[in-house]
Image (cartoon, grey):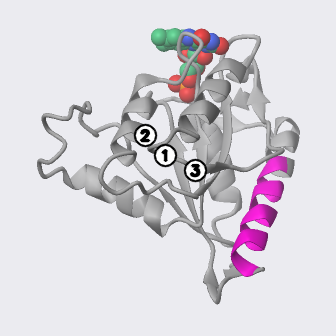
Amino acid sequence: MKRKILGGTMNILFIVGSTRKASYNQIIANYLMDKHKDEYNIRQTDISEIPMFSEDIENQDWPMVDKAREDVEWADGVVIVTPENNYSVPAVLKNYLDWCSRKKRVYMNKPVMITGGSMGHWGTIRAQGHLRQILRSNGIKSVVVPGIEVYFPKVQDSIVDGKLLEEKAGSLNKNFDIFIEYLKKSNCD
Ligand SMILES: Cc1cc2nc3c(=O)[nH]c(=O)nc-3n(C[C@H](O)[C@H](O)[C@H](O)COP(=O)(O)O)c2cc1C
């Protein structure tokens, strides 16, 4: 049964910071989206086709940017699942967030959960640190839901046949529940 929020069903948006076809981070996002598809309205924004941000082009007509911003407005909460590139967030994710920080600042006060996996020992801990900083910037000012820390170090060991192993999903599930509780409290109290 779909959970109600303010008389409707909760809307959860997923953003994946990798555009790789066999992306491990997409597989992690797929796990949550599939698990909760009957409880919440779920969407993912495709950030792969968003043009490289420049102030020279930002006032042109970019339907995919409009759609990306609408998706954030639609969402009660956003889950960002990202790998780590050279100790930071992938350029495609930063580019998407830069677009969302201009004109309509759609991330303002938006609750966000961060998670991600990388092939290294530290499992996106540095990228997630940078992402937290970006999400708190003046142009974005989202609410990174406190108390949520989920990392997938050596992510390749958590995935078999294109699926996240259930025994590796404990922390993800626990933290997603914390995120949902936060959304319910912030919208219903
Ligand atoms: C340009 C580049 C930089 C990378 N930098 C890091 C890094 O800093 N830390 C890390 O753990 N893995 C790093 N990796 C490896 C990624 O963790 C790995 O490619 C991962 O599978 C990417 O996520 P995806 O499967 O969702 O595409 C890097 C990979 C690329 C292509």
Residue 13 at x, y percent in the picture: 54, 57
Amino acid type at circle 1 is Ile
Q: Circle 2 is placed at which residue position?
A: 97
Quadrant hosting residue 53: top left
- Quarter containing the C terminus: bottom right
Return the mark for residue 168: none
Q: Secondary structure at mark 1?
A: loop
Region rendered in magenta: 175-188
Q: Circle 3 is placed at which residue position?
A: 142
Q: Circle 1 is placed at which residue position?
A: 140
- Quarter containing the N terminus: bottom right
Residue at 65% in and 40% down: 28
Taking the magenta stretch, the answer to whether it contains residue 178 is yes
Residue 21 at x, y percent in the picture: 44, 30
| Above or below for 82 versus 106 | above
User: Do labels 1 and 3 touch, CB within 8 Å?
Assistant: yes
Estimate how packed mark 1 is, as few (under 14), some (14 to 19) or many (20 or more) residues with alpha carbons within 10 Å: many
Residue 166 at x, y percent in the picture: 82, 42
Q: Secondary structure at mark 2?
A: helix
Amino acid type at circle 2 is Leu
Q: Earlier in the sequence, mark 3 or mark 2?
A: 2
Residue 56 at x, y percent in the picture: 13, 34
Residue at 60% in and 31% down: 133
Amino acid type at circle 3 is Ser
- In 3D space, how far apart are the residues under numbered discs 1 and 2 (Cα atoms)? 8 Å
- In 3D space, how far apart are the residues under numbered discs 1 and 3 (Cα atoms)? 6 Å
Q: Is residue 54 left or right of residue 72?
A: left
For label 1, being within 8 Å of ligand 1 is answered no
| Above or below for 114 versus 75 | above
User: Do labels 1 and 2 touch, CB within 8 Å?
Assistant: yes
- In 3D space, how far apart are the residues under numbered discs 3 and 2 (Cα atoms)? 11 Å
Is residue 101 shown to the viewer in this render? yes
